[in-house]
Image: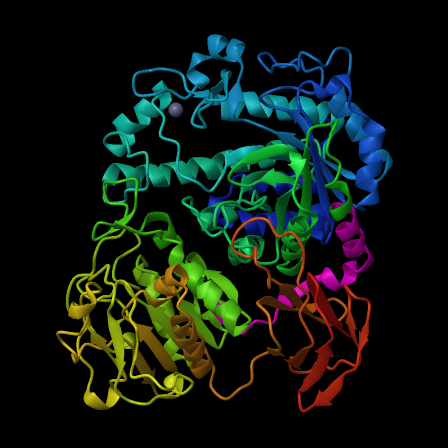
Amino acid sequence: MSPMTRREFIAASASTLVIAAIPEALAQSANHANPKPWYATMRRCGQINYNEIDPLTIDVNAWMDYWTSLKIDAVLLNGGGIEAMYPTEVPFHHRSPFLGARDLFGEMAAAARKRNIRVVARMDPGYVFEEGLNAHPEWIQRDPDGTPRVRTECPWLNKTCMFTSYFTEQMPAIYREMNARYKPDGFFTNGWPSTATLDVCFCSTCQKIYKEQTGGPPTPFADVRSSAYRRYYEIYMDRVAQVWKLWDDTAKENNSDSVYVGNLGGSIRTIKDLKKISEVAAWFNADNQGRAGDRPIWGAAQQGRVASSVMGDRTVTNVIGAYSNSSTLWRHSAKPDAETTLWTAQCAASGMVPWYHWLGGSPLDNRWRKPGRDFFQWLAANETHFRNRRSLADVAVLYPQSTISFYHAEGKEERQLNGAPVDSADYLEGLYYSLLEGRILFDLVHQGNLSVETLKPYRALLIPNAAFLRDSECEAIRSYVNSGGNLFATFETSRYNEWGEPRGDFALSDLFGVHVAGDVAGPAINSYMRIDRAHPILESITDTQILPAPEFRVPVSPLSLDATNLTLVPPYPTFPPEMVYPRVPNTDEPTAVFRQLSSSRVVYFPGDIERTAWRSGSPDLSQLICNSVRWLLGDRPPIASVEGDGLVELFAWETDPGLALHILNYTNPNATRPFIRKFYPIGPLHVTFQLPAGKSVSAARALRSGATLALRQSAGAVQFDVPSVRDYEVIALT
Ligand SMILES: [Zn+2]
């Protein structure tokens, strides 16, 4: 081994620091040799996920010619883990039986490097073959009765446990062998750690943890009322961080510029603590390849926002499955071009690096090649405009990690409120959709990053039912409002601590201006909000004295008469029509609080207005949310005002060459159900764009259409018309 370089010495020293200090340490070690590591400037990424029989037929050069045509910076190539795609000598590292004399990983890596493409070894630490089980029975996850856990579709594969030496000795041994032979630019693990539910395993190592550290086995789902689960959650997250760090150190042993990246993602639904993972991750990969069921098309843009809420400007990639990954999965059939294109466009718009993914080395369906190539070539031609410096959004939306992870799963796998099923992410889904309707520019801020400093760039903080919040997080919100920030919050926000232990009142009752006056009521149908007094938030709503009430609500204390705008009409029968009339037409229970404080404004809805808006589709509720946000922002115009028909999502960035406004066109009958088949162009759109202080621009170009747009200058802003947006448009202002 060569003597340690200064850079390696710094990296090695960093490994002895506490976990919380790692991002700075990583940044410093990178800064000494190079301003940015290679993966920090990467803009396009590809992956051919070959299988064990592919060595018989795969055409190495044809694949690399395809990736070269996409102008990718890095390619993901299957190395090993479950199965080695090279002639490994590590015991129990199962070689593909079809490998023969080939070294497929080596050939692919060499072909990539010949074309100046970086090589990341795609590994899978999740399973071993029977020889691994027999030689190391301690590596394998067990059911409570001791039965080894296997992959249902492939029962010859045994599931490994991350608390065992498989993760701390066997995988590092494999990485070291690959480091010595191929010096990859990075390692990626499929499937691990993921952001989903924690594995609860009964191998001997885990049994020992339960006996000595948690006081018994944890529940297999997120039940934070159980002290065993809470303790296990912390032990689990510590282990994830420890393994991630170990693998990153191992990746760097032979190449200080190398990196380890795990598999994360999960869109807005996560159980594992993203903040904790971000403290060890230099690169966040989102395994958010597509959508199924009733998931909306904007799932990739959501992913970008969630990842940035913990990663800031560090690298975030998003895997785009070019195959048909809907609720019925076809691994070898292409998705419609339009769906693939709009998903990829969202990765680019939200600041992520798109990672194009195909499965199987000898495809029979080749329709997926063109949309990837077309989009990536366009991206490459306009790369400079995707080098973002900062988001220009002036509204922050809280990413309520504890609530999304744990809210109302008491003793049951299905989350319930008063016996009715609830999805803890629906609050954010609902607020998100309302903000799309309102065309409001926003960023997500992770609950773990709440501070006056983080919130400083934002004129308002919007909180979608963050029921579970730490005392310190509530204090950060209070300080933000006291220093002039505006606040929108709903339902049970701040009613519990981060582990769901109830407080006597909202921790933020001083900001909300009301107190908890009873247990959560609902689910209610046929309940209303009576309009008692005019307010700017209600101005656009005319010709009605009532509005639909949310499904659930926290009963709260009355307000003074002059502060009461909306009050509860309790639920009454929906059938039969003879019985459908309110028994109690008036109450003094507020269903909204609109507060003007000395230097800030607060809007609080005691009902789950955003969740009900999302689930019911009520435009009244969505309009109330948008009107509230506009009132919070006051007289100052929005950063970008976009007028014209259509459902769009907006991002605005300060970029290396200037400014960029991204417009994603979701106006489509398949927006909330896969797959987008074709586009329905919108336009013209009339845009007024406020320039950041000190910035001036003199040209506007639409990067998708290639058109130069006429710019009109007006005090601190520019105006322009976008004639048409087919799938996606980026207006580059320079
Ligand atoms: Zn175990």
Query: Residue 16: x percent and y percent?
Result: 52, 39
Q: At 30% from the left edge and 16% from the top edge, which residue is drawn?
A: 145
Ligand 1 picture quarter: top left
> Would you say residue 578 sits in the magenta stretch?
no
Q: Is residue 691 visible?
A: no
Q: Quadrant of residue 148?
A: top left
Residue 403 percent coordinates (x, y)? 35, 54
Residue at position x 65%, y 47% in the image: 29
Q: Is 186 above or below relative to 680?
A: above
Q: Is residue 70 above or below residue 473?
A: above
Mark yes or no: residue 388 visible.
yes
Where residue 685 sits: x, y (%)? 67, 76
Tell which of 62 and 334 is nearer to you: 334
Q: Is residue 503 left or right of residue 190?
A: left
Q: Which residues are magenta?
A: 372-396
What residue sits 31% from the left and 54% below the top?
A: 498
Name the quadrant containing residue 632.
bottom left
Q: Is residue 387 magenta?
A: yes
Asked which quadrant contains residue 527, the reply is bottom left
- Identify the residue at horizontal 86%, vertical 34% (top origin): 114
Q: Position of residue 608 (x, y in %)?
A: 31, 64
